[in-house]
Image: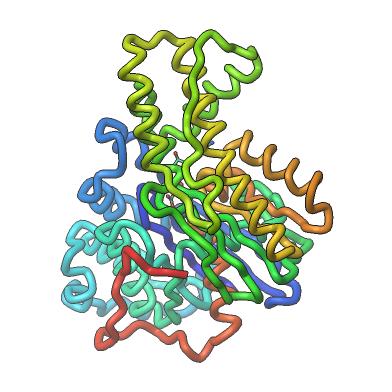
Amino acid sequence: MRILAIETSCDETAVSLLECSGGFSNPIFSVLGTGLFSQAHLHEKYGGVFPALAKREHQKNLVPLLKVALKDTALLEAKPPRLGGLASKDLDSILEQEPELKRQLVEYFSENSNIPNIDAVAVTQGPGLEPALWVGLNFAKTLSFVWQKPLIPVNHMEGHVFSVLTNGKEISNDKSQISNKESVTIEFPALALLVSGGHTELQLVRDWLSYERLGETRDDAIGEAFDKVARLLGLPYPGGPEISKLASIARAENSNTYTITLPRPMIKSNDYDFSYAGLKTAVLYAIKEHGDMDDTYKKEMARAFEDAAIDVVCAKSEKALAEYLPKTFITGGGVIGNTYLRERLTTLIQTKFPETKILFPTRELSTDNAVMIGMAGYLRYEKTPHTYGVYNQSQTLAASGTLRL
Ligand code: KG4
Ligand code: ZN
C-alpha cells in the first residue's frame, strides 16, 4: 500500500510518501519521498509556537513539500489527464479558511493533471494546535476529493507510538529510498512512554491499537518545561536540545560551583501522573534568588533541571514496568531525542527489566514528522479498511486539538 502522509499539528510541516506492507505480523515500511519544514526559528522570538504564524506557514509550505514527497515522477499513473476541468470553485468550501493554500493547489492541479499512484492519504487529525491541524486536514481532504483516494485521519500520539517501527533507520531527504527490510516486532502487552512538547504520558498497550492511559501530566508537559526553563536561561527555542547540550557539558566537566537543589514533583505519588509546572517555577525562584547568571551557573542549572525532570520520568516508568511487566517498552515524542534520557532508560531496562525489549525511534522520527503518521495510518487501515472512504463534502471531519488515544 502506498500512503501519502501529512503532519501539521504544531510547528513542523511534513509530507511523506510511504510504501507499507506485511500488516500487523510483519510491518515493513519504505519511505519513497519525504519533505519536512521546521518553523521553529520563526517562532523563536515568541518563546513558543504562535498559532496564527504556524497556520500561515503550513499554508505556504504544504504544496512545495508535496512536490518534494512526490518527486519521483514514475509514481504518476499514465492516465489521461482528468482534472483539467477542475475549477477553483470546487475547492471553495473545503479550503474556505485557507485562501493561500487554495491558490497554490489550484495552480498545482492545473500543472499536474495526473493522479499519483497512491492508495490513500493519511493526515493528523489531532491532538495539537487547532488552527495548525485544520490546514493539514483541509489539504488532505482536498487531495482525497480530487484524486478520489481514501482519507485516513490519524491520532498524532499514535504516530509517536509507531515511530519506533522503522528499526532505527534514519530517513532524510537526500536518500531517495530507505526501507526497513526487517520488521520491528512489538510484543504485547507493551508500555508506551510518550514525552513531547504537548504530552507526558504512560500508556498500556495490550494489543495493536488498543490503549489504556495509566497517567499523564496534570499541568505542563515535560518538553514545555524544557522550553520554558531554556527561556529563563536565555537560550533559544526549542529549548530541549539547548538545555541538553549545556547539561551534558556540566556532567562531563563534573562542574559543581553552585549548590542547586530542585524538587522532583510527584515522584513518590502512588499513580502514574506527572507535574512539571512546579519544577519550572522552582527554577524561576532559584534564578531570581541567585541574581546575575554566568555561564557556569547556566550549565549547572541546565543539568539540575534535566536531572530532576528525567528522574521523574524514570521513576514513573520503573513503577509501570514493575507493575505490568510489559514485553516491549515503546518510547516516543520530541523529548525522547534527549541523549541522557535514552541512557537512563536503557540502563533501567538492562539492570532491572532485562526481559523487556526497549524501542526508540530514530532521532529524526522523535520530533514531529509525517513518516510516523503514514505508519499509524497504514495500521489503522489494515484493521478496518471499510471505515475509510474518499472524502466528500457532506462528510464532517473536524480537527481536534484535544483528541485522546
Ligand atoms: O514531539 P515534538 O516534536 O512536538 C510535539 O508533539 O510536542 O516535541 C517537541 C518538544 C519540544 O518541547 C522540544 O524542546 C523537545 O521536544 N525536545 C527535547 C529535545 N529535543 C526536542 N527535549 C529535551 N531534550 C532534547 N534533546
Ligand atoms: Zn509530537
Q: How is the image coloured?
A: rainbow
Q: Measured from the top left, where is residue 176 in percent x and y?
A: 62, 51
Between 33 and 265, the one nearer to me in the picture: 265
Q: Is 182 drawn above or below residue 317 in the view shown?
A: below
Residue 175 seen in the figure: no
- The number of discs equals 0
Q: Residue furthest bottom?
A: 386
Locate residue 173 relative to residue 226 in the image: left or right. Answer: right
Residue name at image x 20 percent, y 62 percent: 98
Residue name at image x 46 percent, y 85 percent: 388
Q: Measured from the top left, where is residue 166 in percent x and y?
A: 67, 57
Q: Is 77 drawn above or below residue 172 in the view shown?
A: below
Residue 106 seen in the figure: yes
Locate residue 172 relative to residue 135 in the image: left or right. Answer: right
Q: Is 233 drawn above or below residue 99 in the view shown?
A: above
Between 304 and 49, the one nearer to me in the picture: 304
Q: Is 354 drawn above or below residue 283 in the view shown?
A: below
Q: Quadrant of the N terminus?
A: bottom right
Residue name at image x 69 percent, y 76 percent: 24
Locate residue 366 relative to residue 149 in the image: left or right. Answer: right
Q: Measured from the top left, where is residue 52 in percent x and y?
A: 20, 50
Between 209 and 303, the one nearer to me in the picture: 303
Residue name at image x 69 percent, y 37 percent: 343
Q: Measured from the top left, where is residue 244 in percent x and y?
A: 53, 29
